Amino acid sequence: MNIAVGGLFHETNTFVALRTELPQFQRCALLRGGDIVDRYRGTEGTWGGIIDRAEALGVRLSPALYAEAVPGGVVEHASFLQLAEELVASLDAGADGILLVLHGAMVTSEEQDAEGWLLRRCRERFGPDVPIVCTIDLHANVSPEMVTLSHCLVGYDTYPHTDYYPRAVEAVDILHGILLGDLSPTSSLYKPSAMPAVQSMLTDAPPMNTLIDLAHRIEKEPGVVNVTITGGFPYADVYWAGMGFIVTTNGDPAGAKRRARDIGRAFEAMERQFAVTLPSPDEGVVLAKASNVYPVVLVDSSDNVGGGSSGDGTDVLAAILRHGLKPSVVMLADPEAVLAAIEAGIGGLLSTKVGGKTDRLHGDSVAIRGTVARLSDGHYRSERTGEPKYMGLTAVVDCDGVYIVLTTERVPAFDLAAIESVGLHLKHMRYIAVKGAVQWKSSYGRIARASVEVDAAGVTSASFRRFRYARLRSGMFPIER
């Protein structure tokens, strides 16, 4: 049994000034053929699950191309076409089935539904009968075309995402079942007119866990193959943005449609619980300063690099400096400041302005004066999945107890290892600023004793009225309701 595997993975924020092009994929992950297996074998992410499960089942994998970039701005269509066409062409023509690793919220400069486009090209080459199963992110903006062109979409059940590996195993099992003739999947999608903030999607607490629990109960019913709830990615101004409920059954289209509708209506009855209101940075810093347990994590969810933001938002750093929170650590993406720190050298004095350089949406640059404490090549390994990561040349500047980690690349708040790789011990900090919404909980949450989330300047704010949408469906919660 031969399964062709590959993927394109990008979460696109259409409000980000910077475009995503081929170099961003090359710096993150652009792998071909056996290099995919070599890089991810023994890891605990999606690819690790695919590789391990296929080997356990005795299934041969034919790896094609896998490209991933850090969440960011709209993907240049020419770069997308180059990667997508190579992926489709490199999928083994003799494969019995296809397994694709996708995000589900990729947008190009010419295509709102990049995954739908990719699946359409796969169908043009392989025809309607070759089974295609895809893994997708919980924040996918699922379109009807994605559902109809695939045999099954398997989404993460957790946010913060901690189930990459088991969902990949499930996807392999479903495809294996189709090829054995045991499964004949049919899927149905229910799309309510709703686009909640990602800050409301924590899956182990209300209101989101109510829906996840319902999905898991339905998944245990006879004939149900998979239930996937996608919260959607609200920072993509596309027609199919927002929540989606997908039920896949074994040859029972009416049952799939009924169950997807039931979950969707359960959400609609409780949608007001997904509304989010957050304090300002100064209000949040005052709350953090009043804590008597440490470390306190200051969550800058408006500059969430994991949601495509610039990573150089300054509102939280400015508030920390104003209120004298020490010892504290803040990470900022600022290649210019990194070069200045390298020129000053370890032990040298650095006086410069940092952050707020990408656009006018992430606050003003902040003047700092401190000592260059450490320099790094920026390589580290995720403590969650074991996968190699890279944040570019990196510098740590000690501003009298406020440690500013300056990076060349934007770094999502996914791993403690990003900061600890440069010699800072986070357990010894009183205050830790993270640029994330919920995913930080899977790493920083292990050491945090308290947390305060704030609404700062940035393109991943929970305050949607800051953004100018033009393509959404009408009547969307919480913008119009």
Image (cartoon, helix red, strand yellow):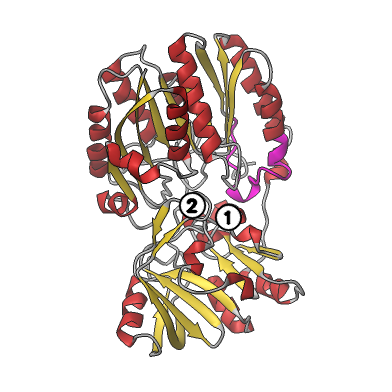
CA gap between label 1 and label 2 equals: 8 Å
Where in the figure is residue 379, as x and y percent of width and height? Answer: 38, 63
Dot 1 or dot 2: first in sequence order is 2
Q: Is residue 353 above or below residue 432?
A: below
- Which label is found at residue 216? none
The residue lying toward the viewer, choosing from 367 and 443, is: 443
Where in the figure is residue 71, as x and y percent of width and height? Answer: 42, 51
470 in magenta: no
Can residue 240 be seen here? no
Q: Secondary structure at mark 2?
A: helix
Can residue 237 be seen here? yes
Identified at 64% across, 16% down, the residue is 258
Q: Please report contact status of discs 1 and 2: CB closer than 8 Å, yes or no.
A: yes
Alpha-carbon neighbours of circle 1 within 10 Å: few (<14), some, or many (≥20)? many
Q: Secondary structure at mark 1?
A: loop
Q: Which quarter of the picture shows residue 119? A: top left
Q: Amino acid at mark 2?
A: Gly
Q: Amino acid at mark 1?
A: Ala
Determine whether, in the image, residue 380 is placed left or right of residue 326.
left
Identified at 66% across, 28% down, the residue is 215
Q: Is residue 365 above or below residue 23?
A: below
The stretch in magenta equals 192-211
Secondary structure that dominates the magenta span: loop
- Which label is found at residue 437? 1
Identified at 40% across, 23% down, the residue is 59
Determine whether, in the image, residue 210 is placed left or right of residue 323.
right
Identified at 77% across, 75% down, the residue is 292
The C terminus sits in image quarter: top right
What residue would you read off at disc 2?
307
